[in-house]
Amino acid sequence: MVLSSEEQEFIKRKHEATLKLRQEFLKQSSNPYRHATGEGGTVFDAGLARFQAMRVSNYEHFKPTGKSFRTGLFAVVLPIALYAWALKTERDGREEKYRTGQVAYKDRQFKFI
């Protein structure tokens, strides 16, 4: 793949900007006198601060839609309801066999003795 001169120049500028930001971060993070400025020992990252603010305020901006309702229904409610129905059906069937005498007491899975 051959890159045009404009694309090569763009990649070069982007790489230089990345190196400049990296050097600035290393300079700030390795400054032994940083605590004297009152900023603490960490470097403020605006992108990380925006990301954390977005994660915290996610529920404040939530808008219920049909898609979110279906997602909640099929991912949470339906599996729990199906599992509860399967458990109830299986236990009722086993209890019916116990009560009608089809399973001897010694052959039961759970016994008191």
Image (tube, helix red, strand yellow):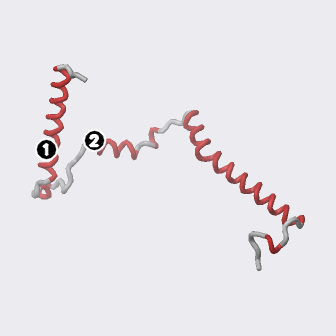
Outermost residue to the bottom: 113
Q: Quadrant of residue 64?
A: top right
Q: Quadrant of residue 12?
A: top left
In this view, the residue in front, 80 or 41, is 80
Q: Is residue 45 left or right of residue 92?
A: left
- Image spot of residue 105 (x, y percent): 83, 73
Residue found 18% across the figure and 26% down from its top: 10
Q: Which element carries disc 2, helix, strand or loop?
A: helix
Q: Quadrant of residue 75?
A: top right
Residue found 80% across the figure and 61% down from its top: 94
Rounded to the nearest whole Å, what is the CA distance between mark 2 and mark 1? 15 Å
Q: Which mark is residue 47?
A: 2
In this view, the residue in front, 61 or 27, is 27
- Image spot of residue 90 (x, y percent): 76, 57
Q: Which element carries disc 1, helix, strand or loop?
A: helix
- Image spot of residue 57 (x, y percent): 41, 43
In the image, what residue type sits under mark 1? Answer: Glu
Q: Which mark is residue 24?
A: 1
Name which of mark 2 and mark 1 comes first in the sequence: 1
